[in-house]
Image (tube, coloured by chain):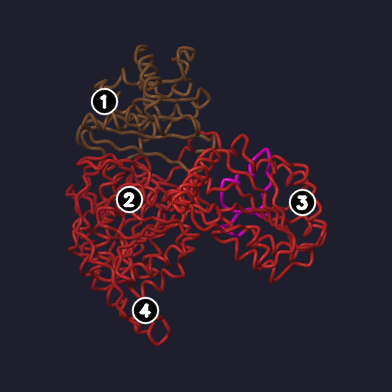
Amino acid sequence: MKITERMLLSGNEAVALAAHNAGVALGTGYPGTPSTEILETFADLGGHAQWSPNEKTALEVGLGSAFGGGRTLVTMKHVGLNVAADPLFTAAYTGVSGALIIVSADDPGMASSQNEQDNRHYAQAACLPMLEPSDSQEAFDFMAAAIEISEQWRIPVLLRMTTRICHSKTIVKPRPLPPPSPASFQCDIQGRVMIPAYARIAHKKLRQKIKKIAAWNETSGLNKIVEGDQALGIISSGVSVVHAREAAPEASLLKLGMTHPLPLESIRCFAEKMDRCLVIEEGDPYLVDAIRAAGISVEGKDDMYRFGELNVNRVRRIVKGDVSQETPPPKGKPPQLCLGCPHRSVFEILRKLDCIVAGDIGCYTLGVLPPFEAMDSCVCMGASIGVGLGLRRVLPGEQARRVVSIIGDSTFVHSGVTGLIEMVYNPPATGHVVIIVDNGTTAMTGLQEHPATGRTLDHQPTGKVVLEDLARSIGVPNVHVIDPSKNQDQFEKILRESLQKEELTLLIARRPCILAAKKIREYEKAAEIAECECCAEMEE
Amino acid sequence: MAGKIANIIVAGLGGQGVLKASDIISEAVFLAGFDIKKSEVHGMSQRGGSVCSDIRYGEAVFSPMVPEGEADYLVVLSEDQVENNRHQLREGGVLITPSMIDENKLTNKKSLNVALLGVLSRNMDIDRSFWLDSIRANLPEKIHEVNFQAFEIGRSIGN
């Protein structure tokens, strides 16, 4: 990316550029649409970015970096914050020495997610400041502001984006940002070791801190009023702001940039001046509930607008109070497994053998669609193994012997490992069969590396987790590695035998994703050349 | 609202170059000095499913999404995606589809998206040089020439 005075950037690119300009020392995360490009762009700009096995690990590494005084960025999609929720809540207690900015990229409307989750609740639940940009310029500005807030108040800050902010391109005028202080460790045992005695103190401190931040937010400059008629006042945040400006250009608008803790006095003052005050927000009634709980009378949207994204048409309807049925848009063509995808033959065989299939998250989830229809459940990253084991426990023997768990390589590393350990520890009477469909990449989000590819975020060779060795070492008795496209008959034969065996089996169906194969060969070749040059130098 | 906003929708199937085409339009408009917002949803949709991208430009653009039924131009890269996107077009809006291009004239059939941008460019008041600069900026050098040709083929068709 060439940095110029006026740029056309996606929200993700704008966050990365701000991180770069602010001298962020480390970016960690797990790829997840719509957040993925933030770390990729940060790396392209020369920043140090790395994919972690999952979001919990990413946040823990990020927290350590911020304990050491570094400016740190951790990125994930909305469901990823569930995985990272454990360290998140305690990170609020410990606080940070440097800056810790956690991006939650929500997906209202579920363009590529398994649920529609409004992560503004996490800010409230964990008691953390949260900023919500409404275009790419604000994504840049709010990333910069988040770093300032995090350093000033020594607290992690949530930067909440949504699909339309992450992936929309709008004009950005970037600017230089104040440089970071050098990283350095300062001992603070009471502040960072959360045994109950210290955590009780930390919780009280956190609540006091957030009260002070709430008072500061009344005049922080992050919330803006666009003057208009007093007949209608709109309170809004994130992408809903721009829909509202367009749908009701005559209205007064209070645009909230920091949505936790809320500037309730500013909101009260705004609402009191209006004949009618309406809250326009995408997803859950987060703002409207909080504002009403403060005793401020405002109007919210009908529950029908809780589902899916907002847009200008829908906001016009909300303003009018129109609750008539909406016309659904004509159906497009659904996505499908690529022609030549190595997962295809696996699903064909699973269907042929009439397996009960506990599935997982990745492009192989498309195995649920015709012509395969070979998936019976899909819940969250890693759930396939646990769900399969649970099914094996309760189903009558004949049905239990048909249960198979299927999981991708990246998903397995993310949160399948503990499922496999559970399988070894509590094996069902009928045994169990797990298939890792290993296509050598994180295909769903656009071909990212992961610990089992043996390459870092920027495709350089690094330590590699060998899945079959891992499985054998934790005690899975039967481990097979097969190319499912080349040896379809053999794959079917082994699967058939494994289902009858009443033992534990891991089948690794290994063949590179057809979209990634060419690039993987290039990376491997580059690594070979680098190794040869290294040997040559040593010989000299 | 300040000034008139022009609304463009590019639609097609994952893998056809819908996002690339919308990037090229966006950058041409950006280079011409307008305020611009481009919006898309990708992810699973990359895998052969319907893909759609919105571009809006003018003096000041608010929402990045084209309000339903208000597209001035609808560019569809796949004939079978015309019907499910037609509702996006405003009355009197311009529909641009692959049937307008003689594919045999294209050196590389993958440049169909750029040929359709040639057709679109006839309707938009954006200097030709910005289009060419944008194609240059968005595509690898070795396919510049093929795409310039495709663009001119589309541009010569008119509407």
User: Label 4, on which residue?
Assistant: A192
User: Label 2, on which residue?
Assistant: A46
Q: Which residue is at the front of the view, A210 or B117?
A: B117
The brown one among the chains is B
Label disc, if present, on residue A495 of the rendered structure: 3
* Range of residues picked out in magenta: A358-383
Mark 2 belongs to chain: A
Relative to residue A430, is residue A304 depicted above or below?
above
| Amino acid type, callout 3 | Leu
| Amino acid type, callout 2 | Gly
Q: On the rendered structure, is A529 left or right of A349? A: left
Alpha carbons under labels 4 and 1: distance apart: 55 Å
User: Label 1, on which residue?
Assistant: B130
Residue B80, given in percent of the width and then of the height, sits at 53, 25
Of tags 1 and 2, the one toward the viewer is 2
Residue A489, given in percent of the width and then of the height, sits at 78, 42
Relative to residue A174, is residue B144 depicted above or below?
above
Alpha carbons under labels 3 and 1: distance apart: 58 Å
